[in-house]
Amino acid sequence: MLRCRPFTTTCPRASGSAAIRFSGLLVDVARWTEAAGMRGLLVLTDNDSIDPWMAAQLIIERTHRVVPLVAV
């Protein structure tokens, strides 16, 4: 049987001082994702965003089961 494992997503933009606020929001969204029983979190990136691999590391460090999916 095929099982659906839903993922949530993050906001795509954060630069400068907004990147500091974004990292806090990212952790909040990751924890909400875990609390909702979701499997993972899509980490969006573009030239104005924080490094997606750093965002993925924040998610891994601050959750127990959430899997980050980096879209580059």
Image: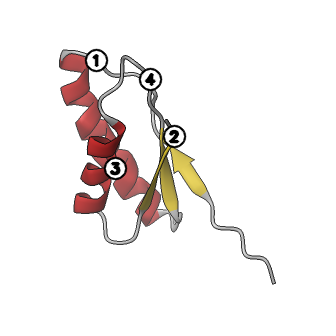
21 lies above or below 16: below
Q: Quadrant of the N terminus?
A: bottom right
Under tag 1, what secondary structure?
A: loop
- Circle nearer the viewer, 4 or 1: 4
On the rendered structure, is 14 left or right of 16? Answer: right
The residue lying at 25 percent from left, 19 percent from top is 18
3D distance between C-alphas at marks 3 and 1: 17 Å
Counting from the top left corner in percent of width and height, residue 10 is at 46, 38
| Residue assigned mark 4 | 46
| Residue assigned mark 2 | 71
3D distance between C-alphas at marks 2 and 3: 11 Å
Give the mark nearer the N terminus: 2 vs 3: 3
- Residue 23: quarter of image: top left
- Circle nearer the viewer, 1 or 2: 2
Q: Amino acid at mark 4?
A: Asp
| Residue assigned mark 3 | 56
Q: Amino acid at mark 2?
A: Ala
3D distance between C-alphas at marks 1 and 2: 18 Å
